[in-house]
Amino acid sequence: MSTAPVVDFVDAVAVYNGYPALAGVTMQVMRNEIVLLQGPNGAGKSTFLRACAGLVPVVRGSAHVLGCDLVIDRESVRERVGLLGHQNGLFADLTVMENVSFWSTVVGATTAERGAAMQRMAVDGQLANRRISELSAGQKRRCALACLVVRRAELWLLDEPHAGLDAKGRDEIDLIIKEAASAGATVVVASHEIERAKNLATRTVSLVAGQVRDLS
Amino acid sequence: MSTAPVVDFVDAVAVYNGYPALAGVTMQVMRNEIVLLQGPNGAGKSTFLRACAGLVPVVRGSAHVLGCDLVIDRESVRERVGLLGHQNGLFADLTVMENVSFWSTVVGATTAERGAAMQRMAVDGQLANRRISELSAGQKRRCALACLVVRRAELWLLDEPHAGLDAKGRDEIDLIIKEAASAGATVVVASHEIERAKNLATRTVSLVAGQVRDLS
Amino acid sequence: MSMSVSRVARAVAAKDLRIELRTRVVTNQVLPFSGLVMIMFAFALDSDDVLQRVAGGLVWLATLFSMFILVQRTFAVETYDGALDSLRVAGVQPQGIFLGKSLALFIELLVLEVVLFISAVVLYRVSVGGLGAVLLVTCVLCATAGLAFVGTLYGGLTAGARGRETLLPLLLLPVVAPVLICATRATESAFESGGVTVGEGWAWVAVLATFACVFGLGGLLSFGSLIEE
Amino acid sequence: MSMSVSRVARAVAAKDLRIELRTRVVTNQVLPFSGLVMIMFAFALDSDDVLQRVAGGLVWLATLFSMFILVQRTFAVETYDGALDSLRVAGVQPQGIFLGKSLALFIELLVLEVVLFISAVVLYRVSVGGLGAVLLVTCVLCATAGLAFVGTLYGGLTAGARGRETLLPLLLLPVVAPVLICATRATESAFESGGVTVGEGWAWVAVLATFACVFGLGGLLSFGSLIEE
Amino acid sequence: MTTATVNSKGVGTPTTRIYGALAIVALGWVLLGGLFFTPEDVVQGDAVRIMYVHVPTAWVAYLAFIVTGIASACWLIGKKHSLGFDRVAGASAEVGVVFMAMTLLSGSLWGRITWGTYWVWDPRLTTTAFLFVTYVGYLAVRGLGGSPEQRARRSSVIALLAVLEIPLVHFSVVLWRSLHQQASVLSPDGDIKMDGLMLFTLLFGVFGFSVLFAWLVSHRQRIMAMQDALQTNALDAAVSERLREAQV
Ligand code: HEM
Ligand SMILES: Nc1ncnc2c1ncn2[C@@H]1O[C@H](COP(=O)(O)OP(=O)(O)OP(=O)(O)O)[C@@H](O)[C@H]1O
Ligand SMILES: Nc1ncnc2c1ncn2[C@@H]1O[C@H](COP(=O)(O)OP(=O)(O)OP(=O)(O)O)[C@@H](O)[C@H]1O
Ligand SMILES: [Mg+2]
Ligand SMILES: [Mg+2]
């Protein structure tokens, strides 16, 4: 089990309204890796992450994540992966605390875990009782990260986790990623901040036009 | 006239629902400068940019932009500034071309200027006829930048212009900023990518908790 | 598994109700809207006995309008910032989401109906006896449960992707219109308007209950695949 | 200056209409909704002469409902991704935005009303003579212009900030209710229902025209300050 | 699937030709019988002849919707989730919608003659209209886009819920006091009150429209298979287009 790849895509194709956002991706990610996904705008990085999370169907080729075949069943893998997308997935009219509590309840995290996550992302204290709609862009992103951290997923899929965060936040999220990896999780990060992400990652994969480009 | 500062805030206070996002900002920006605004999440960078554009009222202190007194009249300055916020300001159901055309018409830009802007941001060709809702995050951002470029503003206010762009896009936007500055415009950039922005900027200002921190 | 379904359902319902309390869509938007319908009718048909005869129908018509707004609203909250995606990817049981959202919708609709019935009693001067009240309450509960289930079901289906939400009225209309008719007839019996007796109403309530069961069950079984892309 | 106002107005109206054509909110969402109102009324009041008497009122009531949805929709498009902020900061003349959005709303409402009047003629079997038709067209144009102006005005006011949109019905209702009443009376004259003559209708149309002028002028003068935060 | 689509010139097969011939013959008889051979009605006169279209189309529309429901259930239950079932469901619903439209049309013409009005807010008429709109909605859901599998998943749910409306339409005349004809052929007491030739023509009409239904569905379903195949080809083209993009 532990030698099988966590993510195993072979010639996977994913489409949006007939447009092949992934045009035959072949890629393996092993346990404990931190993989940096890079590539130009529109290359298909976000689509790849969403496909790994079972949100976007893989219509051709084969795709396995954590041992589940995504072509047959996209649902059972979901509770084991955590996805941070471009959108935050927060409820604008609820406070930070209410949002994090909601996600904690839904995924079955404890109050202590919740508190720890909020403290790490510095959205505790005064901020906790402000509504999401009253936060700055970076504060919202922090809140989304706190909701992700309480999940303790086996596979982390992060779409530009650094975007919008300040220097301290960036360091913190790097630390969180490293801790998760050393605790046995696997991480795939899509990012345009290549310098920072390269330091973090154990390996880099380039996507171009919906395909993996050979690393030269 | 040309020796008067383009942005001149003295003890300016701006509030959202009673929360002072700017708590007495004193800051001058001279013509042709490229100022980097940095600071932690929630420091008030976005609010400062929005105040300069006349979107957020300055309720205390004095604020002048391009010679207009923002406390008295927030509207007349607007046609001379260009703001790129966290949001893109695009219409999701229209195509890239239709969006850029709309903004060009509204600000009175020519077809040639529109074409040039779209080409620079690489949203011409096939992409031009796709709807905004079908674009990737970075492609949307490029489109928003194209709409900004057609404006030829005197004061450019950029809120994290690099976020979401790929390496080539980042280089392009840096070039655009430099060209604008050398053509006589003034630029204020809020960014968390300090390394990149520092190379670009002529000066750095730190905001913390709604105030300018003295540069040590 | 079933424990976690009920936990999710409670969390989702609590969240929806809290958002409602905070943004007050029902109070500010839906109630005046329904109030308008009621008053306009009173205005348009200013004859007392026509009014009394149609009072039941009016209340249900107003409920239906409000339901469209509420369903749209309750899923707009989920899709605005991609929360529905997050829920799906969190591996949350779709049954939990379905039950939770239905429960919240049920409560909101119920509050609305109570207000509407009270205003019908005041505006249109209808009266209801003891047995009639029992019938009325059962009818309201069954009809509202049915509306909440079917609203959540189709709301989820149309929430998936951009542009789809315009399908909602087309899908909902033919399904809820029978509910409207049955509920109206039952209400007329409860009000004993037009010479109908209370006893006749129970057949309609049975239809309403069946409807609620079918859509409750259908939703539980199929909600997961409906909210997928 | 005035040239650029008209340029902006045309660009805004063209954009709104293009979005409408592409997303088909009117066709898919508003029309079935208004259709429901008409059918339900017909169903609830299944006596032919009551129906004929209230036909005019029903059309206007359905228009009003649809108008709420349309106004909400037309400003949701602007606020969804901050486009209204961008418009403001682009130094665009607010008069241009006001006129453009009013024009688009006017056209959308007009299309809707034509369909509604045709279905009223079919469903409720009302008839209209030559003079009545002139009155009806004038009435529809004036009333629609008024509704478009007032909808844009208050839509802009409530579009400014989050949570405010729920205020819209509360603000709009008392203002458009008179329009509803005047238009209904004028329409009744046009249909000569209930023994009113066509001639009586023109007084109501005059009120509608005044209303449209007042809100058109008010909007031109104040829209800029209303959409500010 | 692909073999049939690429090679043959049309979508016909020997079986469909038999259906077609049968349908033409049967409907030809109904036309002649309905217009000339059957007697006038005592009350309605010649207007009764509309019945030979009105009633069969209504019943075959029911049949079509039930077939849609069964095919959807088969798709759901089947281990392989064969898309063939989904196509049959879709094709059947399309034909059903057309037939239901014919029922509505012939009914309102008939109503104009006998009741003096095209439309009344009668339970049977209203529920029929709801059923029609429901299946228009079903077809709209099929058109939402996405992969054929997802289309099948979504629409099968709707089909199974929608089919429950048929009893509502059928019993609406009993449930609500109705202006429309009570069930006289399929009446609960099993007592048929109709002239022999009229009954025969009516039943033959039902047969003819059923065969027509089968004919149309078998064609339509094969066209849909081709469309799905075309979509697959279009995807091939789009993928290679994207691959070329990568080379630049
Ligand atoms: C738009 C108007 C009408 C609609 C939508 C309509 C609809 C239907 C439907 C759906 C059925 C099948 C009922 C079932 O067996 O479950 C039916 C049957 C029938 N309709 Fe109509 N109908 C309309 C007008 C009329 C009129 C005007 C007449 C004659 C006066 C009529 C006479 C019949 C008869 C005789 C049957 C067969 C009833 C039986 O034996 O079960 N219909 N109609
Ligand atoms: N909803 C959609 N409908 C149609 N096409 C889409 C949709 N979403 C994305 N695409 C297209 O799919 C391709 C891949 O998009 P994706 O979001 O995966 O890119 P990305 O690598 O994440 O880019 P970015 O760096 O800009 O975030 C793009 O060309 C985009 O235009
Ligand atoms: N609509 C609002 N209502 C109330 N408070 C707000 C609102 N928007 C922002 N704030 C608060 O104002 C402060 C400044 O926000 P601003 O968006 O200017 O920060 P920022 O420096 O741009 O941060 P970031 O780096 O995260 O973008 C923050 O503390 C934020 O919580
Ligand atoms: Mg992306
Ligand atoms: Mg900011």
Image (spheres, coloured by chain):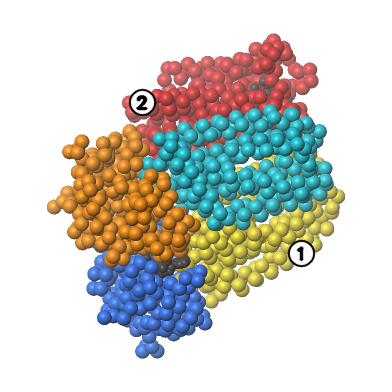
Chain colours: A orange, B blue, C cyan, D yellow, E red
The type of residue carrying mark 1 is: Ala
Vertical relation: B179 (above or below) A114: below
> Label 2: few (<14), some or many (≥20) within 10 Å?
few
The three-letter code of the residue at mark 2 reads Lys
Which residue is located at x 61 percent, y 65 percent? D153
Look at the numbered disc 2 and say if its residue's Cβ is closer than 8 Å to ligand 2. no
Q: Quadrant of residue B145?
A: bottom left
Which chain letter goes with mark 1? D
Closest to the observer, C138 or E154: C138
In this view of the protein, which residue sits in the foreground, E22 or A16?
A16
Q: Which residue is mark 2?
A: E80
- Picture coordinates of residue D67, whole percent (x, y): 63, 55
Which residue position is annotated with label 1? D206
Provide residue E178's location: percent of width, then percent of height: 73, 28
Q: Secondary structure at mark 2?
A: loop
Q: Which mark is residue E182?
A: none
**Residue E24's quadrant in the figure?**
top right
Residue lying at 46% horizontally and 27% vertically, measured from the top left: E72
- Farthest residue to the top: give it: E196
* Residue at 20% across, 54% down: A201
- Is residue D52 among the parts visible in the rendering? no
Is the C-beta separation of discs 1 and 2 under 8 Å? no
Query: For residue B206, which quarter of the picture?
Result: bottom left
